[in-house]
Amino acid sequence: MDAYRYLILAEGSFGPLTSKTANSAVRYLGDRVVAVLDSTRAGSTVESVLGFGDGIPVVATLTEGLEYGPTALLIGVAPSGGMLPLNWRPMLIGALEAGLPIVSGLHFYLGDDPELQSFAESRGVPIHDLRRPPDDLSVSTGLARDVDAFVVHTMGTDCNIGKMTACLEIRRGLQEQHRSVGFAPTGQTGILIEGWGIAVDSVVADFIAGAAERLVLQAARGNDFVVVEGQGSLVHPAYSGVTLGLLHGCLPDAIILCHQPSRTCAYGGNGAYSWVTLPSLPEMIHACEAAVAPLRPAKVIGIALNTWDLSPEEAAREVEKAERETGLPATDPVRFGPEPLVAAVIAARDAQN
């Protein structure tokens, strides 16, 4: 997948909150994204929708997208439940007929679909199901405690709040400090960017922690630091199970808490979780630390804010507020840079030694 140039399918859903995989591909693989397919946004640009992605067009049809010379079709949206929308099937078949491999992060494995697989085989192109887990996973035995690398795990007050982005920005900051750091991808988008990993939300529940443990052991090889991508939230009714399993498998040395200041209730389509009021930052810090404390005490050492929907002035005030409420360094790592979090990670590692 390293050489693919992507046409991203985000039909009817391209937006800051509704197309996480597409958005991250644009941010971190932007030079390999040729266009986004969403007929409801056609004629606009990616930058006009997301605020970044200069020069990438949004097109109305597959035929129009093919004119930009993609070498693969990337499904850039993960609909609720991860199933394949019926109106996407003709576009997927058309892409395969045009000789494009398909890269998918859906829970529904396209490679298991007889019709799609038949078209793929007839054109000699692969289907990559990023969420398909390895078949040899086992339960965790706590081996992540023994790695020499300093393990940092991003957790969130909610899902879809920037945990992967915080990891990648912290990694970049550590690398700029000439530190060796591995990134442990735990979701389909991280796997897309890194080219390896395990989507822990597709793993049998008993093996979630084992998958996280395996990722830490692999990411730690030859590195002084490991950043582990978080998933879900301890207080989200739909996704807390994977969050806890991931936490107990990676057994971090420290935690970065991710938060979107403008969000007041748990995220979900059509306001499904509007009844779930998000806890305050101090309350969430306590919950995260208490959840891992019996196995390996780990402190929250910094706050990563997602302020995409705020003005620069509002965002700066929220950073100050988070620091005041928690006594911890805070930043929006995309908007203001990850430096305060990077400094906190290095300081925590030095204190441990």
Image (spheres, helix red, strand yellow):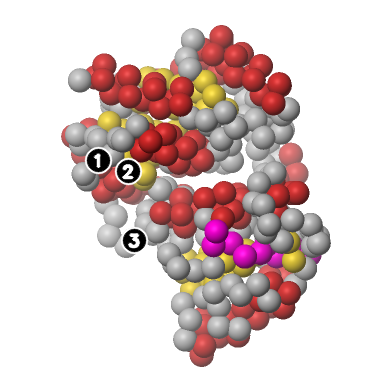
The answer to which of marks 2 and 3 sits earlier in the sequence is 3
Q: Which mark is residue 113?
A: none
Mark 3 surroundings: few (<14), some (14-19) or many (≥20) residues within 10 A: few
Q: Nearer the viewer, mark 2 or mark 3?
A: 2
Circles 1, 2 touching at the beta carbon (< 8 Å): yes
Q: Which residues are magenta?
A: 31-39
For the residues labelled 2 and 3, the Cα–Cα distance comes to 20 Å
The answer to which of marks 1 and 2 sits earlier in the sequence is 2
Q: Is residue 208 left or right of residue 79?
A: left
Q: Amino acid at mark 1?
A: Asn
Q: Amino acid at mark 2?
A: Gly
For the residues labelled 1 and 3, the Cα–Cα distance comes to 24 Å
- Which type of secondary structure does the marked residue at label 3 adopt? loop
In this orientation, which residue lies closer to the viewer: 321 or 127?
Answer: 321
Please state, as top left, top right, bottom left or bottom right, where the N terminus lies in the image: bottom left
Does 268 appear above or below 128? above
Where residue 197 sits, quadrant-wise, is bottom left
Q: Residue sitting at 66 percent across and 64 percent down?
A: 35
To which residue does mark 3 refer?
Answer: 134
Please state, as top left, top right, bottom left or bottom right, where the C terminus lies in the image: top left
Q: Which mark is residue 223?
A: 1
Q: Nearer the viewer, mark 1 or mark 3?
A: 1
